[in-house]
């Protein structure tokens, strides 16, 4: 028996996967993508949407994802599950048979489990149609149906087909594939047209709603007009009964109306002149704003240039602050001690400093780094000694050996004394270097100054 978890000779899984994908209607493909979180993430990457217009791109991405997963069972079975119901005729025949009492009897007779789906040769001959060859190949490759070798051979190589017929069938299958691709493109166009039609229908409904609204407003206005006309007729009746009085009042009203019209015309002329004045002021203010904006841009450019000059000045200031560190890092201390004419006390302090510099075997205490960093390394021993003495009660217990603890404290006193002597010498040496050997003008430069030339009288 061959199941869909076995490799079948003569079957291209990628081609069958592509054929299943091409046969899916848009609504089925849309649901297949949106229900799969990983596919949905890949298909919408970069702001794309799952639209009918994007179908060719979506199909390529689904195919690429399946290829990346090496067409795993999970990937292929998921697509087969949505493809199978699309072939309604084949789906109905097989599902009706497998749910029938006839198949239950066949399964009991051949001792099959409920998970086994097998077609006898008789049923296979009844259901199989050569015109559905591609669909049966997909069933052979992906469905849970188990096919005997003879049925698989009939699906892969239809009986009685010559090489020429098989070649023609391959060509027809290729043409069918191209036709399916064109059909998929046409389906995408159809779905796009449907989407446009839905958009137009929505717009039409909105226009109809607006028309109904406007018609209601017109009906309301017509009703108001009728009310006005009725009121006008009532007033006309009253006017007809008091003709003389109303004629007099009409003359007065006409005269007042003429005066009012003249006054309103004058007021209208004044307002027009005022509006023209405000328009001129607006244009002037607009021009002034443009000038202010231009000046602001110029000021911004100057500010950027000033910031750049400030950064450059700060950089030069930082370079100038490294002078002392550069000076000390270039001193060869052993040669300096042999060349200096030191008094016994200074020589002792100098030797103490050299011993302190070379005290650690790994030479961790050197004058590398900045002067404050070197000074801080010399002070560490003093701080550690004070902490040991201040917390001696606790440290004795933690150490577990009181005699060894106080022996360590004793050794620390010698180290701290050497460190203090070294720093005393360093203070004097730095003072001598900075204020006797070099001039104030040389100290102001950011690099180590050259040696001061000797005067002729000294040479």
Image (cartoon, helix red, strand yellow):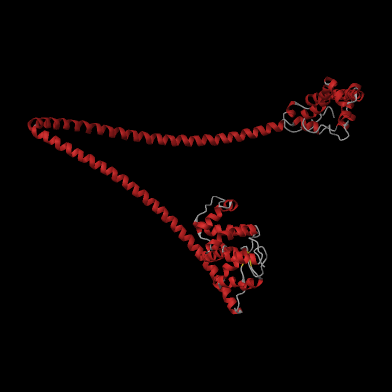
**In the picture provided, is 293 more to the left or to the right than 356?**
left
Q: Nearer the viewer, residue 243 or 369?
A: 243
Q: Position of residue 286 (x, y in %)?
A: 41, 36
Residue 332, image quadrant: top right
- Identify the image quadrant of residue 65: bottom right
Q: Is residue 13 visible?
A: no
Q: Is residue 128 above or below residue 336?
A: below
Number of marks drawn: 0
Give me the residue at 46% from left, 60% from top.
Answer: 190
| Residue shown at 17% from the left, 30% from the top | 259
Residue 108 or residue 270, whichever sits in front: 108
- Taking the spot 44% from the left edge, 58% from the top edge, the residue there is 193
Check the picture and name the quadrant holding the C terminus. top right
Is residue 63 shown left or right of residue 382?
A: left
Up/down of 242 relative to 167, above or below: above
Residue 178 drawn above or below residue 208: below
Q: Foreground residue, 92 or 397? A: 92
Please determine whether, in this image, residue 432 is positioned above or below residue 2: above
Q: Quadrant of the N terminus?
A: bottom right
Left or right: where does residue 111 sit relative to residue 271?
right
């Amino acid at each position: 028996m061959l199941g869909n978890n076995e490799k079948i000779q003569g079957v291209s899984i990628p081609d069958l996967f592509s054929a299943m994908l091409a046969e899916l209607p848009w609504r089925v493909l849309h649901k297949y993508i949106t229900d799969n979180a990983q596919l949905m993430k890949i298909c919408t990457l970069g702001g794309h949407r799952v639209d009918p217009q994007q179908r060719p791109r979506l199909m390529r991405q689904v195919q690429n994802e399946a290829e990346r997963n090496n067409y795993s069972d999970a990937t292929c079975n998921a697509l087969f599950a949505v493809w199978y119901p699309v072939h309604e005729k084949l789906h109905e025949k097989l599902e009706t048979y497998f749910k029938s009492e006839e198949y239950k009897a066949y399964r009991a007779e051949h001792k099959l489990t409920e998970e086994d789906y097998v077609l006898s040769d008789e049923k296979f001959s009844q259901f199989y149609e050569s015109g559905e060859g591609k669909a049966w190949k997909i069933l052979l490759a992906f469905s849970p149906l188990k096919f005997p070798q003879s049925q698989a051979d009939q699906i892969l190589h239809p009986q009685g087909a010559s090489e020429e017929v098989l070649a023609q069938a391959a060509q027809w299958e290729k043409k069918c594939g191209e036709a399916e691709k064109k059909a998929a493109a046409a389906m995408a166009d159809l779905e796009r047209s449907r989407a446009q039609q839905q958009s137009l229908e929505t717009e039409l409904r909105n226009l109809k709603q607006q028309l109904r609204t406007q018609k209601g407003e017109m009906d309301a206005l017509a009703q108001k007009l009728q009310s006005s006309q009725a009121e006008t007729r009532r007033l006309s009746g009253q006017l007809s009964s008091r003709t003389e009085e109303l004629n007099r009042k009409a003359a007065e009203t006409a005269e007042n109306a003429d005066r009012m019209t003249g006054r309103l015309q004058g007021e209208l002329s004044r307002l027009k002149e005022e509006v023209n004045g405000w328009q001129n002021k607006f244009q002037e203010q607009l021009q002034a704003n443009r000038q202010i904006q231009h000046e602001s841009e110029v000021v911004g450019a100057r500010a950027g240039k000033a910031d750049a000059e400030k950064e450059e000045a700060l950089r030069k200031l930082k370079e100038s602050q490294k002078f002392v560190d550069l000076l000390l890092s270039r001193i060869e201390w052993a040669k300096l001690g042999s060349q200096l004419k030191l008094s016994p006390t200074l020589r002792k302090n100098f030797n103490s400093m050299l011993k302190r510099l070379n005290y650690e075997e790994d030479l961790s205490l050197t004058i590398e780094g900045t002067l404050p960093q070197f000074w801080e390394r010399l002070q560490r021993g003093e701080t550690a000694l004070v902490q040991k003495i201040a917390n001696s009660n606790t440290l004795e217990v933690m150490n577990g050996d009181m005699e060894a603890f106080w022996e360590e404290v004793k050794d620390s006193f010698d180290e701290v004394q050497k460190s203090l002597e070294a720093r005393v010498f360093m203070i004097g040496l730095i003072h001598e270097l900075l204020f006797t050997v070099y001039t104030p003008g040389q100290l102001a430069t950011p690099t180590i100054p050259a040696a001061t030339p000797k005067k002729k009288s000294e040479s």
